[in-house]
Image (spheres, helix red, strand yellow):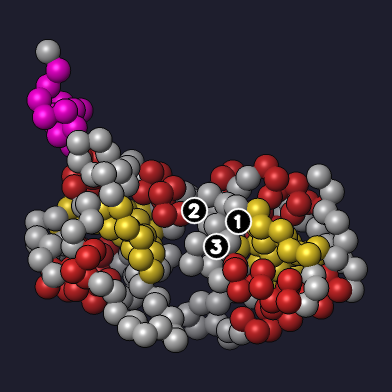
């Protein structure tokens, strides 16, 4: 499908591995006049853009001069109203803690067509790449996803740790630098120190590294391993089952070994 002129496509780039981008997203990327991309988008994906495409890096990150969201919105509108097709390439899924909806509103408010192309979200994909299911029959029938960056303008920027402590599996995004705070919150809310935890850095990429421990020891283990951001943390019994022997995993799921 060829991109229409004066259209902005909010495209999910997936969790890191370029091969996990959707077929439709890749097709639009290859034909776009302008590609506005984030810091966590794989450089390999940018090689698929047209040779004459304008590539604009608007990535935010530690130690980098940040491009404001207002400026990003302006870029999208300006390029589209100039008659150019625009792909806004965002890590994971555009609407999963990615401010994609803000960009959609800005475009449509300016009279610019905007289409969302969902992406493979890191929430489940990164744990899966480490062999961890976020839900599992007989072990976990619920999961919650939080971001360590709660943003501004919220009535209460604290997480509801009491509620989170009752969820089978908790997945924490962008939590490398606030891991200690979140762990303390879960422990104070009653989550046991022995609760299995996994931290996964650079998930689905060749740089993927994992640390497995417990809630009471995970902070020390992550620091000792010098695990880097981006990092996803998984808290819950699914972590232990993923590391168990086949017989122990079967027993955990079914309650006993099948006869």
Query: Disc 1 on helix, strand or loop?
Result: strand
Can residue 91 be seen in the rendering of this structure? no
**N-term-proximal mark, 1 vs 2:** 1
The quarter of the picture where residue 103 lies is bottom right
Is disc 1 in contact with disc 2, using a CB cutoff of under 8 Å?
yes
Is residue 256 magenta-colored?
A: yes
Please determine whether, in this image, residue 8 is positioned above or below residue 77: above
Along the line of sight, the residue nearer the viewer: 96 or 179: 96
Look at mark 1 in the image and give the residue it sits on: 12
- Which numbered disc covers residue 137? none
Look at mark 3 in the image and give the residue it sits on: 95
Q: Residue furthest top?
A: 259
Quadrant where the C terminus is found in the figure: top left
Q: CA distance from mark 1 to mark 2?
A: 8 Å
Please determine whether, in this image, residue 203 is positioned above or below residue 7: above
**N-term-proximal mark, 3 vs 1:** 1
Along the line of sight, the residue nearer the viewer: 126 or 160: 160
Q: Nearer the viewer, mark 3 or mark 1?
A: 3
Is residue 257 magenta-colored?
A: yes
What residue is drawn where x is 67% and y is 61%? 10
Is disc 3 in contact with disc 1, using a CB cutoff of under 8 Å?
no
The quarter of the picture where residue 145 lies is bottom left
Can residue 74 be seen in the rendering of this structure? yes
Look at mark 2 in the image and give the residue it sits on: 121
Percent x, y of residue 15: 51, 54
Dot 2: within a 10 Å radius of its alpha carbon, few (fewer than 14), some, or many (20 or more) residues?
A: many
What residue is drawn where x is 50% and y is 83%? 63
What residue is drawn where x is 43% and y is 65%? 230
> Could you tell whether 185 is left or right of 24 in the image?
left
Residue interval drawn in magenta: 244-258
Percent x, y of residue 180: 23, 74
């Amino acid at each position: 499908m060829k991109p229409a002129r004066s259209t902005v496509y909010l495209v999910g780039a997936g969790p890191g591995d370029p091969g996990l981008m959707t077929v439709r997203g890749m097709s639009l990327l290859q034909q776009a006049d302008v590609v506005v991309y984030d810091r966590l988008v794989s450089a390999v994906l940018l090689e698929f853009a047209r040779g004459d495409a304008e590539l604009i890096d608007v990535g935010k990150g530690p130690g980098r001069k940040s491009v404001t969201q207002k400026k990003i919105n302006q870029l999208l509108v300006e390029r589209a109203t100039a008659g150019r097709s625009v792909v806004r390439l965002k890590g994971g899924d555009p609407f999963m803690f990615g401010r994609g909806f803000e960009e959609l509103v800005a475009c449509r408010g300016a009279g610019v067509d905007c289409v969302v192309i969902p992406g493979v979200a890191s929430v489940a994909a990164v744990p899966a790449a480490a062999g961890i299911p976020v839900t599992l029959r007989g072990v976990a029938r619920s999961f919650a996803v939080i971001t360590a960056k709660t943003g501004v303008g919220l009535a209460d920027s604290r997480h509801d740790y009491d509620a989170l402590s009752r969820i089978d599996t908790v997945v924490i995004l962008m939590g490398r630098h606030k891991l200690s705070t979140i762990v303390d919150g879960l422990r104070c809310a009653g989550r046991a120190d022995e609760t299995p935890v996994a931290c996964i850095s650079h998930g689905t990429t060749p740089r993927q590294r994992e640390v497995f421990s417990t809630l009471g020891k995970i902070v020390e283990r992550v620091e000792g391993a010098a695990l880097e951001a981006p990092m996803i943390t998984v808290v819950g019994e699914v972590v232990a089952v993923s590391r168990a022997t086949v017989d122990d995993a079967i027993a955990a799921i079914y309650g006993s070994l099948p006869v």
